[in-house]
Image (spheres, rainbow, N blue to C red):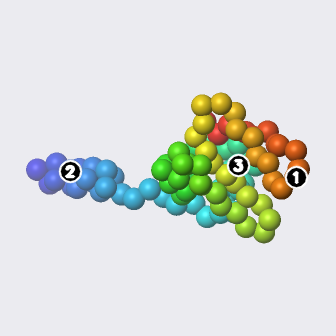
Amino acid sequence: MKFTITWSVFLLMAVTAPAQKFPVDQLLEMARTRAAGLEQALNDTLGADNIKKGTAAAGESGEFVWAIAAASEPQLQINDAPPRRTAESG
């Protein structure tokens, strides 16, 4: 009986636990190395709605990571520089 109650409480905690947010420097390192779990880290930290809207970005010390959900390969263009190719996370 005690095991069942403990297990039920653990499952409830796992289901209701908030998503883990990652520090920006860790997101940048994950993006640089294309680490496993990058897509989930971006969703948890930047928000799935922001990724869908194209407004998800984080950065520090002149380094940035942008996340966007797109049907085709997006390109990033900064000022008058030519567009840059992007990398897929998932």
Q: Secondary structure at mark 1?
A: loop
Cα–Cα gap, marks 3 and 1? 25 Å
Compared with 87, 58 (above or below) is below
Indicate left or right for 51 with 79 as reference: left
Cα–Cα gap, marks 2 and 3? 36 Å
Which mark sits nearer the N-terminus, 2 or 1?
Answer: 2
The numbered dot on residue 31 is 3
Amino acid of disc 2: Ser
Name the residue beneath numbered marker 2: 8
Neighbour tally class for label 3: few under 14, some 14-19, many 20 plus, Cα within 10 Å = many
Q: Nearer the viewer, residue 47 or 55?
A: 55
Residue 37 in view in this figure: no
Image location of residue 41, percent across then percent down = 56, 51
In the picture, the quarter occupied by the C terminus is: top right
Amino acid of disc 1: Asp
Neighbour tally class for label 2: few under 14, some 14-19, many 20 plus, Cα within 10 Å = few
Count how many numbered circles sit on residues in the image: 3
Q: Foreground mark, 2 or 1?
A: 1
Name the residue beneath numbered marker 1: 80
Q: Nearer the viewer, residue 74 or 58?
A: 74
At a point 59% along the width and 54% down the height, the residue shown is 55
Indicate left or right for 25 with 42 as reference: right
Q: Foreground mark, 3 or 1?
A: 1
Look at the numbered discs 3 and 1 and tell me whether their residues touch, using CB distance below 8 Å. no
